[in-house]
Amino acid sequence: MNEMTSPKTGTVKALPDAQRVTEVRHWTDRLFSFRVTRPASLRFRSGEFVMIGLLKEDGKPLLRAYSIASPAWDDSLEFYSIKVPDGPLTSRLQHIEVGDEIILRPKPVGTLVHDALLPGKRLWFFSTGTGIAPFASLLREPQTYEDYDEIILTHTCRDVAELEYGRQLIEDLRADEMMRELLGDALDKLRYYPTTTREESPKMGRVTDLLRSGAIFDDLGIDRGMNPEADRAMVCGSIGLNTDLKEILEGYGLREGANSNPAEYVVEKAFVG
Ligand code: A2P
């Protein structure tokens, strides 16, 4: 049992699932990331999510599903979150500081996992906003590079500042000595395709529009379209993105998979409140 000690984030109360905050980073006035200690008993597959949260005034937990942004081998847990001024959880969670405690239920679940896809050659990670989190985990998972010849991460955000978390993730990954040692040239399989929709940047537009027009394939120098034999996709973003991409992927002949029934693509909603 731990004590919930932060005056900012909740009443002092004994918590069975408390984890201590070890790092907080504010990326923009809408986005922040943080790390917490990892319970010794927690096992998860890269790409899964857990319930995390804070205690409410009445002493009951307020929990939401958050993708774990760190890989399964890491000894701490990273999360990437939106800040919603009137969001029940994030209006308070955004104020956490190093040393505070949050609640973490150690029961990981989710479909954005390698097990839910059939073997393929090219893996697409489609994300908007904080939907990049599960892919931040999977991109640091060696199996991603072992199982595929090519990995393409797309990240669409409103403006350039909101791309920064992903940009640094890719930069750090490419410079990471341990990953280099482990994977060697396999790291070069990774392609990064950031786009913005509301601010000028080298590549503008929703990824859905770029797929429909074929521009994304031309930009990446690959044949237009996807092939259910070779292409696999994971999607994580707003409901709109998920719905639109499902239609596009089904149009290419890809079918939605699940842990119990692996197929060609999987989808999960990024938490937004
Ligand atoms: P847009 O600016 O055109 O709405 P948000 O911050 O609201 O979650 O959005 C993150 C990014 O996702 C924005 O760039 C937004 O574009 C984009 N987006 C929203 N809906 C869709 C959709 N249905 N398909 C593709 N991208 C979307």
Image: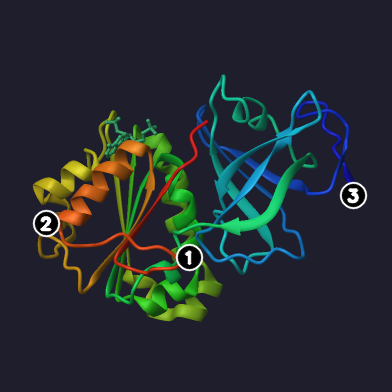
Q: Which residue is mark 1?
A: 175
Q: Choose the circle earlier in sequence order: 3 or 2.
A: 3
Q: x, y percentage for residue 17?
A: 78, 49
| Distance from the alpha carbon under mark 1 to that under mark 2 | 27 Å
- Mark 3 surroundings: few (<14), some (14-19) or many (≥20) residues within 10 A: few
Say whether residue 263 is left or right of residue 138: left
Rendered image: mark on residue 218: 2
Residue density around tag 1, few if under 14, some if 14–19, many if 20 or more, within 10 Å: few
Disc 1 under 8 Å from ligand 1? The reply is no
The amino acid type found where label 2 is placed reads Asp
- Image region (quadrant) for ligand 1: top left
Dot label at residue 1: 3
Q: Closer to the N terminus: mark 1 or mark 2?
A: 1
The residue lying at 63 percent from left, 46 percent from top is 51
Asked which secondary structure carries label 1, the reply is: helix
Q: Amino acid at mark 3?
A: Met
Residues under labels 3 and 1: Cα distance? 39 Å
- What amino acid is found at the position of numbered circle 1 in the picture? Ala
Q: Nearer the viewer, residue 97 or 269?
A: 269
